[in-house]
Image (cartoon, rainbow, N blue to C red):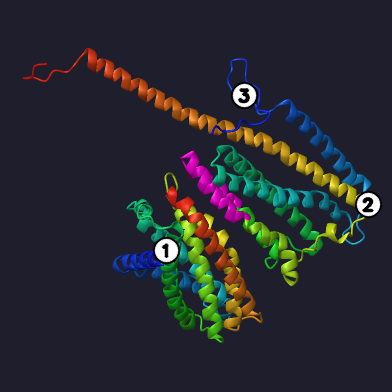
């Protein structure tokens, strides 16, 4: 089955070479919208919304930390898991490239989530890191799993073997997401994290609006990064397979030259007549 | 069932002849136990109170070596291909290898238990809990190790990647086993049985995932 072509594939250069850029009209519009959204969220978060009665100004970290956590936990890992499942089902490099792109962004956002969480934790809980906190620990483990997944991908040579084996690794790693998500509820006495403020309806109108807008903007940012990373990954894959094709063509050409030479100048062993 | 038994017997027979676990993995585990004692300045009170954590960290380190050995038995002679050609179901091969690995790890843990009793002066308060938790944790380690061990071999893959892949996956097992042992040797007031139950859930999850995924990873090993 032929591989599906990437939607909104990047334009070709005047010389006809693919992969001169990963931008397209769609991504430029999306990028512009995300940029405007980030500015609006910044203004709302830092100048318009009120500080919290208890947490004061540090509550503004909510507008960064929560969207990053949502993108990391629910989007990156979910996309990686679904794409990996599709790799095992369809044996498709398109899905493998999608899984790899999602994992890379997942690692990036998971790292940011841990850093912003620590920045929030220092003034709020009076500690940068709490070893006994299950949410922190399960998130750190998820981060290490994603790093391991990316390191593993770089080692495998055969693209299809890499796709299949990485898919297994990704699916096992994504099981950890359940632990990360439910840890606050399952181990209530072993976490400093509060339960979801969104679900409990604790937030006021403007805070809630800003938070939802921030989540929307970060989802847009994730989509924009995802498209670009996917296109880079797809070009890498094409370059890999093109390299193999070129090597095969060169070998075949060399073999045909050898045959021609053998026909035109047959080697005659001493003492034997042709 | 006969395939599982055959693979289990094969791996244990290979081990009984090569003696890699007894001559390399076990001494390594004991060295780690001694190093912890030295690093903690031979403070008996600290060693006793940290015994559960030190014990299971040592087991995890030793398990990476045991897993590498378990997979090397097959990969060095291209035996995975031969196993596939026998027509045996991949999940049966997985189960056989995981059982063999579990038996070897249990042997290592038995010696380590003597080590912590002698060197760390720890005493087992609840033997049933300790044995049950150790069994559940070992099955979880053996199942995850058997799957990740095969992932860490193949064209271009270096075996140095195994700890990077395996240890994060086993972190929940480390936490749960340590808590269960805390109760079993009276170093902390926790409910060890609830942690043992969690260990059982991990063991079951790794066993199911490993059985399902082994066919895929064995293909390219």
Residue A18 image offset from top left, x and y in percent: 59, 23
Q: Which of marks 2 and 3 is nearer the N terminus?
A: 3
Left or right, A195 with reference to B74: right
| Residue occupying image coordinates x 72% and y 63% | A182
Q: Which of A153 and A59 is in front in this view?
A: A153
**Neighbour tally class for label 1: few under 14, some 14-19, many 20 plus, Cα within 10 Å:** many
Q: Name the residue under label 1.
A: B97
Q: Which chain carries label 2?
A: A
Q: Mark 3 lies on which chain?
A: A
Q: Give the range drawn in magenta.
A: A146-174
Residue A223 image offset from top left, x and y in percent: 72, 39
Q: Name the residue under label 3.
A: A20
Q: In this view, does A151 lie above or below A201?
A: above
On residue A205, the disc is 2
Left or right, B14 with reference to A75: left
From the image, state whether disc 3 or disc 1 is nearer to you.
Answer: 1
| Residue occupying image coordinates x 85% and y 44% | A213
Q: In this view, does B207 lie above or below A2?
A: below
Local SS, label 1: helix
Residue A84 image offset from top left, x and y in percent: 59, 47
| Residue occupying image coordinates x 34% and y 53% | B82
Magenta region, mostly helix, strand or loop?
helix
């Amino acid at each position: 089955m032929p591989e599906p072509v990437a939607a909104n594939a990047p334009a070709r250069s005047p010389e006809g070479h693919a992969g001169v850029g990963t931008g397209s009209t769609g991504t430029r519009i999306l990028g512009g919208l995300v940029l405007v959204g980030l500015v609006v969220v910044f203004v709302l978060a830092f100048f318009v919304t009120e500080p919290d009665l208890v947490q004061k100004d540090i509550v503004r970290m909510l507008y960064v930390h929560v969207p990053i956590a949502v993108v990391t936990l629910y989007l990156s890992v979910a996309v990686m898991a679904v794409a990996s499942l599709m790799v095992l089902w369809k044996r498709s490099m398109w899905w493998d490239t999608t899984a790899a792109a999602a994992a890379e962004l997942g690692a990036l956002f998971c790292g940011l989530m841990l850093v912003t969480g620590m920045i929030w934790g220092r003034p709020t809980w009076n500690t940068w890191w709490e070893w006994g906190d299950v949410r922190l620990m399960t998130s750190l483990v998820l981060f290490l799993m994603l790093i391991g997944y990316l390191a593993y991908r770089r080692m495998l040579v055969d693209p299809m073997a890499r796709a299949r084996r990485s898919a297994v690794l990704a699916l096992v790693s994504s099981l950890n997401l359940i632990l990360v998500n439910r840890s606050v509820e399952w181990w209530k006495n072993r976490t400093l994290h509060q339960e979801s403020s969104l679900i409990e309806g604790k937030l006021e109108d403007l805070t809630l609006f800003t938070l939802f807008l921030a989540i929307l903007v970060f989802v847009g940012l994730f989509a924009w990064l995802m498209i670009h990373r996917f296109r880079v990954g797809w070009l890498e894959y094409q370059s890999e397979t093109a390299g193999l094709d070129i090597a095969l063509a060169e070998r075949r050409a060399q073999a045909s030259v050898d045959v021609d030479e053998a026909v035109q100048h047959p080697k005659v062993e001493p003492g034997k007549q042709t | 069932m006969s395939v599982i038994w055959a693979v289990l017997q094969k791996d244990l027979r290979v081990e009984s002849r090569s003696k890699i676990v007894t001559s390399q993995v076990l001494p390594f585990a004991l060295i780690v136990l001694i190093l912890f004692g030295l690093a903690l300045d031979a403070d008996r009170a600290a060693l006793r109170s940290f015994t559960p954590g030190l014990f299971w960290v040592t087991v995890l380190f030793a398990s990476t070596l045991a897993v590498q050995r378990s997979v090397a038995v097959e990969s060095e002679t291209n035996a995975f291909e031969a196993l596939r050609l026998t027509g045996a179901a991949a999940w049966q091969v997985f189960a056989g290898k995981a059982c063999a690995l579990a038996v070897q790890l249990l042997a290592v843990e038995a010696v380590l238990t003597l080590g912590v009793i002698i060197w760390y002066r720890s005493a087992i308060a609840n033997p049933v809990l300790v044995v049950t938790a150790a069994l559940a944790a070992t099955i979880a380690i053996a199942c995850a190790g058997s799957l990740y061990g095969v992932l860490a071999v193949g064209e271009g893959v270096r075996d140095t990647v195994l700890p990077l892949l395996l240890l994060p996956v086993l972190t929940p097992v480390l936490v749960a086993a340590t808590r269960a042992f805390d109760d079993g040797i009276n170093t902390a007031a926790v409910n060890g049985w609830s942690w043992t139950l969690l260990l059982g859930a991990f063991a079951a999850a790794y066993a199911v995932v490993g059985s399902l995924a082994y066919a895929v990873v064995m293909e390219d090993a």
